[in-house]
Image (tube, rainbow, N blue to C red):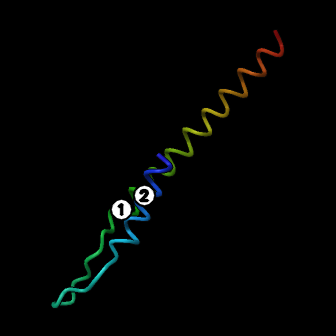
Amino acid sequence: MLFLGSACFIAYGLIGSHLDADGTLREPFALLPIGWALIAAGALIALIGFARTRLRVRSRRRS
């Protein structure tokens, strides 16, 4: 998920934005919140995995 979030930001930068002849801004804005959501989800999953690993190690030391 972290990789996909980063890919969204890279794609946003590569696609860029431009103005149409009538002054309408065209940009892939949807990639920004999707990228942030993927990075947040990836970080949350990583933190949960880290916490579960620490709890397992701690419970094995007590046994």
Question: Badge 1: how crowded within 10 Å, few (<14), some, or many (20+)?
Answer: some
| Horizontal arrangement in the rendering, residue 8 relative to residue 41 (left or right) | left
Amino acid type shown at disc 1? Leu
Q: Where is 24 relative to 61, above or below?
A: below
Depth check: give the residue in front, 56 or 4.
Answer: 4
- Per the image, the residue denoted by label 1 is 31
Q: Which mark is nearer the camera, 1 or 2?
A: 2
- Upstream in sequence: badge 1 or badge 2: 2
Question: Badge 2: how crowded within 10 Å, few (<14), some, or many (20+)?
Answer: some
**Looking at the rendering, in which quadrant would you find the C terminus?**
top right
Amino acid type shown at disc 2? Ala
Residue at point 21% right, 84% down?
24
Residue 37 image offset from top left, x and y in percent:
44, 52
| Count of marks, rendered view | 2
Depth check: give the residue in front, 14 or 24.
Answer: 14
Residue at point 28% right, 83% down?
18
- Per the image, the residue denoted by label 2 is 7
